[in-house]
Image (tube, coloured by chain):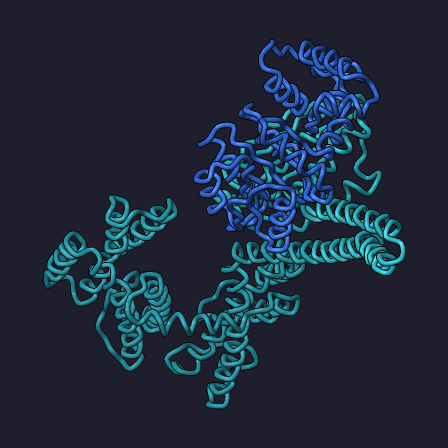
Amino acid sequence: MRVVIGEDLFLLREGLVRLLSAHGFEVVAAVGAAPELLAALVDEHPDVGIVDVRLPPTHTDDGLRAALQARQQIPGLPVLVLSQYVERLYARELLADQAGGVGYLLKDRVFNDDQFTGAIRTVATGGTVLDPEVIGKLLERHSRTEPLTRLTAREREVLALMAEGRSNAAIAQRLFITEKAISKHAAGIFDKLGLALSDDDNRRVLAVLAYLDS
Amino acid sequence: MVFAVVLLLTIGCIAFVLVREAQGVPRPGGLRGRIRDRGWALLLLPVAMAAAVMAGGAHGLVPAELGIAVLAVVFVPKLAAKLVPYGVLALAVFGGMLARMYHDGFTNQVQYLFIHAGPDAWDSGAAPVLAEAGVLFVVGLWLLVRLDVPGAGPVRTLAARWLDRGRGGISAVHGLLLIPVVGLAMQLLGPGNWFGWQAVDGLDAALLDLTLATAALVLIFRSRAWAATLAAAGLLVLGGYGWLIAVFWPALPGFAYGVTDLHNDPGSAHLWGAALQGSVLLAAGLWLAPRVTRQHLAGPADLELAARARQLTQRVQTLTQTRHDAVDTASAELRRIERDLHDGAQARLVALGMSLRAAERLFATNPEAALALVSEARQTSSRALSDLRDLVRGIYPPVLADRGLADAIRALVLDTPLHTELDVDLPGDVQTPVGAAVYFAVAEALANAVAHSGARTVRIQLSHAAGLLRAQITDDGSGGADPAHGTGLAGVERRLATFDGILAVNSPPGGPTIVVIEVPCALSSAKTSSC
């Protein structure tokens, strides 16, 4: 799997290269600034781009903007965004094109290499992975008016795990129920959120998006 | 007849110009600008007329001079206006010379402006001419400065220096100087004293004395500024009169002047006495006049100055207070950050190091235990990062740094568990420190709405108009919020005050609660991306 890395801190960049190489990823470019990142993403067209939000030249959200720009030029280009902090505002912007293939994780998630590489693979195959911290903030909210209130407690739990990028099998394992039951919950969620039958991945993205907009 | 024409022309010209000027500064070259130039220039007509009449109107000089003056006013108004002060001053000098000539036995009759002067008596000769020349001299100097013609500079400097001595205002002592002035006036108004002119005597004189004394005392106690003004004028006039006596004796009839009685002994000792008295009075008048003049001239400007001084004093007090608060807030903030780091990330990093050191030792002997320790170290590092993240958010929210105020508040709204409407109208971005203060103010208001109001929806309006950044947070909760209760909003208020910002809370029982934050600040036109 071909990977482009955009990270300005040398130690972290080298660490990521080493980690990914060790797990059998092919790092085709590792750059330290937003303009180079955009060029690499567009030219190399990797299976997934791993992008730090804060990059030179302005050291604000240049990395995020480069990723969004690359996805404008190549719709659905899988991008996993890493940051020292997660913001729902940025998650929404990443998911806004509804093309899937988006991840948004705290940098610390790299520590757990199995989970991290799992997330990279999910994103590369068009899935959506959001950091549990984003999800956690959502669970703190007790919305009163949105369609999500129609979901049962169990369905909300499933939706939260779905947003974290977990497969039905993983969710089943986590909640100690069968995969079939998860499918049923998922169908219930899609139904209540008014998501028509289409390919399952896209509906998962839309469901997560609805969740984020709550 | 001639006097009336000259008088009317002069008064008309000055009134015309002053009224025109009071209507505002006219555009140069515009109609009003041209009219103003002509107005000053018109003064040349009475001056020319007076000069011509004085030189002997019978010789047909009047029409010729007036004709030249009219031509000058019409075709070269600026030059004509500039000639006016010099003309007036020349008339004054001529008046002085005329008075001297009368004194030395000049016998012709001369029309000196308003006075038909002759040699036959003192009161129609030197003294009135000299008085009029003095008035003209003062008017000439005023015009010199007013029209800013060459020569105005030194006069203005001298006047400013003279006025400068009058700093310090009018005190009760200045007003009391009216007493000797009135006393001397009473004496001079008595029989045969004022140039030999008898105003009153007997019972009338006593009644006049009584009236004058009462009026002076009332004036001194009611308005010492006007008492001092009158005193200054009186001192100058009476002092000048003393010198007139000394210089022009024996052409004058005998009379008393203060301690000098020239009725009985017109000897040189009494002449010197009159001169000395006159000098003392003149000196006192010259000392008092600038103080009085200053008081009257600088009336409105003084008020303005005093108001400005009050404003500045208030501003300094505000700045001292807010600076004090800002320093306090900053140092409290630093203490909090230090404590958070010390108890949080720092402590966790120490634990991390200890775990790794222990793992190092155990690798050879007990690899499994070492592995467990390394795993623990990883979790500790995660928690340290989490601590640092929370800390950073409290110091400076990342989205504020990345995107500016509008997006930072958008992110805030997304994290708020209430239905929140956001209405942003910011054409540019806000400077970093102001943006942070407003961000934390909105965050605090929003947190209060969530925690205390029981509101269902919150509405945030963010706008910028007329140099004022305004944020309004309205919730439909139960109201009754008291900003004095609890330290949250008070802290926010202090932080905003550093930028001259204010926070107002309107929260009647039953709601709604409206929090308004206003900070004067300019917006940068483009989005500032770095900070």
Q: Nearer the viewer, residue B162 or A122?
A: A122
Q: Which residue is drawn at 11% across and 59% down?
A: B64
- Name the image quarter holding residue A180: top right
According to the rendering, which colour does chain B have? Answer: cyan
Query: In the current view of this chain or complex, which residue is farthest to the front?
Result: B365
- Decide if residue B123 is in sight here: no
Q: Nearer the viewer, residue B347 or B34?
A: B347
Pinpoint residue B158: horizontal percent, then vertical percent. Answer: 42, 74
Q: Residue at x 64, y 10 (%)?
A: A194
Looking at the rendered structure, the number of numbered marks drawn on it comes to 0
Q: Quadrant of the N terminus of chain A?
A: top right
Pinpoint residue B407: horizontal percent, then vertical percent. Answer: 59, 36
- Name the image quarter holding residue B55: bottom left
According to the rendering, which colour does chain A have? Answer: blue
Q: Which residue is drawn at 30% across and 49% down?
A: B12
Pinpoint residue A80: horizontal percent, then vertical percent. Answer: 60, 36
Pinpoint residue B34: horizontal percent, then vertical percent. Answer: 24, 48
Left or right: B68, with B100 as reference point: left
Q: Nearer the viewer, residue B49 or B82?
A: B82
Up the image or down, B487 lies above or below A129; here it is below
